[in-house]
C-alpha cells in the first residue's frame, strides 16, 4: 500500500491532521492501536483556545461545536474563601470555548468516516523505517497479518507512550522532564456546574478545579497523593474534600451526585527536541506534556498540527519545503511558552509536600499580586486564551 502521509495515532492530533489534509486532497492513513470506542471513552481536556476552534472550522467539523459549546470570557481564581475573576475578554478581546475532548474526537471520527478516511484500528507492532531517507515506510500487524505502507512523510501523533518518539535515535533526541509530587483525581458527574465560570482553587488542603462539559455535566478535580488510587475515594469523600477547598459560597451551592467516571492523572512537564527527524514529525503528546493546570495539553497539540499542516500544504502545493524544515523550531518556540505557563500556574496553586513557611508566603504573595495587578492578570489572560500561532 502507498499513501502520502502515514499518521500514527488516532487521537485528536492524528485525526485533525488527517481531516485537514484530506480537505486539501492529500491522502493519509491513520494507524490506531486501540478501538474507536476506547479512544472515545477517554475523558480528558475541556477547554479549547480560539486557534483550536479555527482549526476545527478549517477542517469542516465545527457544526456541533459551534452549536453546543460554551464561550467563557473569564475564570475565577480562589484561595480559601477569597476569590477574584480574570476577565479574558477585557484583557485580550477574546475568550475560550468549553467543549470536551471526547466531543472533538467524536466529531473528527464522524467526519473521517463520512469521507471514507482510512483509519486502521487495533494495529500492533507499528514500526517506522528509514525515516531519515526520502523513502520512509511503516509496518504494522493487524488481525495477525503484517502490512507495509510506503509514504512521503510520517506524522507521529501517538501520544506520550507511542513508538514515534522512540524511533528518533538517542544521539539526536534530547528530553526535558519535570515530575510533580502529586496527581489530580478527577470525576465527571451528571450535575449542573457549581458556577458559570471555571474555578481554579488554591487552599491549605491543596488545589481543586471546578470545570464543566455542559449544563448538566460537571468535571471536578482535586489534587491528590500519587499513591492514591481512584478506589480509595468514595464519591462522598471526594465531594467533602472538594467543598473544603473551594470558597464557602460555592461549597454551599455545590450539587453533588454519583460520579460517572473517576480517574487519577499524574502531573508532568515534558518536552523532546527536535520534533522532526528526517521525514518523521512528532505532534502533540508524542512530543510534549504539560500539567493540566492552564488547560494547554490539547491546545498545544493543535498548534503543532497547524504548523505541520501548513508546512505539508506548502510542500505539496508549491514544492516548497520551508514550512516542514522550520516545523520543529516553530512548534517548540510556542510549546516552551505553554510549558512555562502551565508550570507557573501549577506552582502558583498547588500545595507541595516540602514547602517551607517562606515558600508558602511567596505563593500567597504571588496570588495577591495577581489579584491586585492589572498587568499580571493580562499576562495570565493572554497565556490562557492562547498565544498566537
Ligand atoms: P493522545 O490523545 O494520547 O492520542 C494518541 C493516540 O495514539 C494511540 N497510540 C498508538 N497508535 C498506534 N500505534 C502505537 N504504537 C500507538 N501508541 C499510542 C493511542 O491509543 C491514542 O489514541 O495524544 P494527542 O492526539 O496528541 O492528544 C493530546 C491530548 O490527548 C492531551 O494533550 C490531553 O488530553 C492532555 N490531558 C489534558 N489536557 C488538557 O488540556 N486538560 C485536561 O484536563 C487533560 N486531562 C490529559 C488529561 C491527558 C491524560 N493522559 C494522557 C493520561 C487526562 C489524562 C488522563
Ligand atoms: C477540564 O475541564 O477537564 C479541565 C479544564 C481546565 C483545566 C484542566 C482540565 O485546566
Image (cartoon, rainbow, N blue to C red):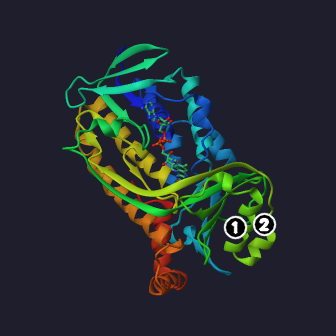
Q: Is residue 263 above or below residue 24?
A: below
Where residue 197 sits in the image (x, y, percent)? 67, 65
Residue in front for this viewpoint, 123 or 27: 123
- Visible residue check, residue 387: yes
Residue drawn at x 35%, y 59% is 336
Residue at 35% in and 44% down: 307
Q: Nearer the viewer, residue 157 or 170?
A: 170
Residues under numbered marks 1 and 2 in contact, where contact means CB atoms less than 8 Å apart = yes
For residue 272, above or below residue 120: below
**Judging from the image, what secondary structure is the residue with disc 1 in?**
helix
The residue shown at (59%, 53%) is 264
Q: CA distance from mark 1 to mark 2?
A: 9 Å
The first of marks 1 and 2 along the sequence is 1
The image quadrant that residue 17 belongs to is: top left
Percent of width and height locating residue 188 = 70, 52
Residue at image mark 2: 254
In the picture provided, is 91 more to the left or to the right than 6? right
Estimate the x, y position of residue 67 in percent, counting from the top left.
68, 45
Quadrant observed for ligand 2 in the rendered image: bottom right
Q: Ligand 2: does it lie within 8 Å of the C-beta at label 2?
A: no
Vertical position of residue 191 compared to residue 90: above or below: above
Give the residue drawn at x 62%, y 67%: 208
Foreground label between 1 and 2: 1
- For label 1, the crowd category at 10 Å Cα-Cα, with few meaning under 14, some 14 to 19 and many 20 or more, is many
- In terms of secondary structure, where does tag 2 sit? loop
Q: Is residue 150 above or below residue 373?
A: above
Q: Which residue is mark 1?
A: 242
State the quadrant of the N terminus: top left
Q: In the depicted view, which residue is nearer to us: 303 or 129?
A: 129
Residue 250 position in % (x across, y down): 75, 72
Residue 29 in view in this figure: no
Amino acid at each position: 500500500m502507498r499513501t502520502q502521509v502515514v499518521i500514527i495515532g488516532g487521537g485528536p492530533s492524528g485525526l485533525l491532521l488527517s481531516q485537514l489534509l484530506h480537505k486539501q486532497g492529500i491522502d493519509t492513513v491513520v494507524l490506531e492501536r486501540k478501538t474507536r470506542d476506547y479512544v472515545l471513552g477517554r475523558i480528558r481536556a475541556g477547554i479549547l483556545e480560539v486557534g483550536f476552534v479555527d482549526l476545527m472550522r478549517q477542517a469542516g467539523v465545527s457544526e456541533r461545536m459551534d452549536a453546543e459549546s460554551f464561550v467563557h470570557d473569564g475564570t475565577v481564581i480562589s484561595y480559601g474563601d477569597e476569590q477574584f475573576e480574570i476577565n479574558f475578554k477585557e484583557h485580550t478581546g477574546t475568550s475560550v470555548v468549553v467543549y470536551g475532548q471526547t466531543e472533538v474526537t467524536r466529531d473528527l471520527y464522524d467526519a473521517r468516516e463520512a469521507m471514507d478516511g482510512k483509519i486502521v484500528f487495533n494495529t500492533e507492532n507499528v514500526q517506522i523505517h528509514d525515516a531519515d531517507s526520502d523513502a520512509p515506510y511503516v509496518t504494522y500487524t493487524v488481525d495477525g497479518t503484517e502490512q507495509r505502507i510506503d509514504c512521503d512523510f510520517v506524522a507521529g501523533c501517538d501520544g506520550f507512550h507511542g513508538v514515534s518518539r522512540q524511533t528518533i535515535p538517542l544521539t539526536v533526541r534530547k528530553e526535558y522532564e519535570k515530575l510533580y509530587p502529586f496527581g489530580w483525581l478527577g470525576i465527571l458527574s451528571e450535575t449542573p456546574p457549581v458556577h458559570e465560570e471555571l474555578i481554579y482553587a488554591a487552599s491549605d488542603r491543596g488545589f481543586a478545579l471546578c470545570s464543566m462539559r455542559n449544563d448538566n455535566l460537571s468535571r471536578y478535580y482535586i489534587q491528590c497523593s500519587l499513591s492514591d488510587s481512584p478506589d480509595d475515594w468514595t464519591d462522598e469523600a471526594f465531594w467533602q474534600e472538594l467543598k473544603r477547598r473551594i470558597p464557602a459560597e460555592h461549597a454551599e451551592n455545590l450539587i453533588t451526585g454519583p460520579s460517572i467516571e473517576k480517574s487519577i492523572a499524574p502531573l508532568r512537564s515534558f518536552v523532546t527536541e527536535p520534533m522532526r527527524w528526517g521525514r518523521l514529525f512528532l505532534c502533540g503528546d508524542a512530543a510534549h506534556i504539560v500539567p493540566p493546570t492552564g488547560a494547554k495539553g490539547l491546545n498545544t497539540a493543535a498548534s503543532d498540527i497547524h504548523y505541520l499542516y501548513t508546512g505539508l500544504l506548502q510542500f505539496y502545493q508549491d514544492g516548497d519545503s520551508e514550512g516542514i524544515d522550520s516545523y520543529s523550531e516553530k512548534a517548540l518556540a510556542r510549546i516552551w511558552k505553554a510549558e512555562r505557563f502551565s508550570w507557573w500556574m501549577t506552582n502558583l496553586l498547588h500545595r507541595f509536600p516540602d514547602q517551607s513557611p517562606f515558600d508558602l508566603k511567596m505563593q500567597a504573595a504571588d496570588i495577591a499580586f495577581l489579584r491586585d495587578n492589572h498587568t499580571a492578570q493580562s499576562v495570565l489572560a493572554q497565556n490562557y486564551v492562547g498565544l498566537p500561532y
